[in-house]
Amino acid sequence: MKSEQQYIDLYQQASQLIKTHSADVLNAVRDEAFADFKAQGFPTKKVERYKYTDMAALFAPDYGLNLKRLPIPVDPYETFTCDVPNLSTSVYFVVNDGFYTQALPQNKLPEGVIIDSLNRIAAERPDLVAPYYAGLAQTKDDAITALNTMLAQDGLFIYVPKRVKVDRTIQVINILRADVELMVNRRVLLVLEEGAELKLLFCDHAADNRRFLTTQVIEAYVGEGAQLELNCLEETHLKNTRVSNVYIDQQANSRVNHNVITLHNGITRNRLDLVFKGEGAECHCNGCVIADKSQHVDNNTLIDHRVPHCTSNELYKYVLDDNAVGAFAGRVLVRQEAQKTVSQETNQNLCATKTAHMFTQPMLEIYADDVKCAHGSTVGQLNNDALFYMQQRGISKREGKLLLQFAFVNEVIDKMELVPLRDRLHHLVEKRFRGELNKCEGCQLCK
């Protein structure tokens, strides 16, 4: 039986139950998403954007779902910490796919800023959600987005009104918690109006040693002159499968800094679609992957330059050990109208063993004639000459290897604008290379 059939049957049997526990705005696009998913099925490796990950195999197991919205027995504020020293944050929790509302940060948000349950705001303020929800994440274009849209019942909604700056970094800790194997379908909607500023840190953790399958769709609308820093850190475990699709819409003179860091995982598939819709916009998209054992990490990006005078920079680096598999496919599309485009795309990779595999495919598609664009990739091993040099000066081979790997990924981490987060990641990355970061550091649930 095809993997998608169980989800088709599930929706046909439980669609009314799903809708009963969801707001009308979310339900309005649900049936259309189901039709799109049913028509497409899971993408095969023959589909260009999915050629490095077998999606049907990921979704084949029969996971449980919390469609009745039963409460999850966990108090994250008492048992879970994800501290970044010297970084002043307002901490919010999403447990599986539900926004945790039993206790919220005491810090007062600027006037008009909303950080809340997507389902609740969609029900209470549909005028804020309806114009944006499922606008960027088109279900006709992607089966995984369609699956998420037809099943998602809650998630996170963040709204920042015109010319409002949120000074404190918003830290959102996504906790996977279950007593059975569980599928989670999480939705995130970010709306930054003209001139707004927001810094976000998403931390993904698994509190139980169970098999989890997470689909996540993030839609981010970045208005004219607005600034968004979006940092995504995954630190789960080998039984976790994570499929995340991020869609970003940038208006004129806006700025986006998107960083995705994979420190611990099982199988991860990240997709980023970013569109420039206004002149003078700028984005910096960076990725850092550290994988060993049999871990699999696939990053797929599309930067769409639709208008003139926009700038994009991409830098993704992988360090693969043991039998790990990495994949990067990045496409920069410069349309005919997008004159004066500046773009740089770089993917650099280290395979620490002969059994690690890296697939890399940087793509540059240009239809304009007045641009400055470049792209490139490298795959290699550690520099033996450098290792020998360090050994000659009393540094062990193992320590020298760690130093070279650490220096290699530092370039990505140093591009982060939040200095305390940058320092924290330096610490976590070093521990990861030393094999000392097997569980979520500071997490009482994982002890």
Image: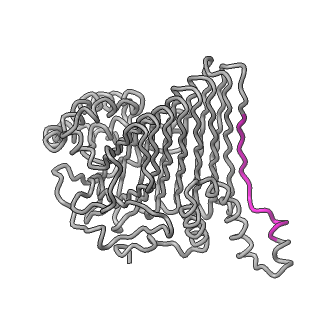
Up/down of 260 relative to 144, above or below: below
> Residue 286 versus residue 349: which sits nearer the camera?
286
Image x and y of residue 274, in percent: 51, 35
Res 157 visible: no
Q: Nearer the viewer, residue 216 or 43?
A: 216
Which quarter of the figure has residue 307?
A: top right
Q: In which quadrant is the C terminus drawn?
A: bottom left
Q: Residue furthest bottom?
A: 394
Measured as percent of width and height from the top left, residue 149 is found at 31, 37
The answer to whether 5 is drawn above or below residue 447 in the figure is above
Q: Measured from the top left, where is residue 258 in percent x and y?
A: 53, 46
- Residue 209 appears anywhere in the view: yes
Front-most of residues 330 and 104: 104
* Residue 29 vertical position relative to residue 191 in the rendered view, above or below: above
Identified at 17% across, 39% down, the residue is 19
Quadrant (top left/top right/bottom left/bottom right) for the N terminus: top left
* Residue at (50, 70) in percent of width and height: 85
Residue range corresponding to the magenta coloring: 374-387
Q: Quadrant of residue 364?
A: top right
Q: Of 261 and 32, which appears nearest the observer?
A: 261
Left or right: 374 as drawn, with respect to 121: right
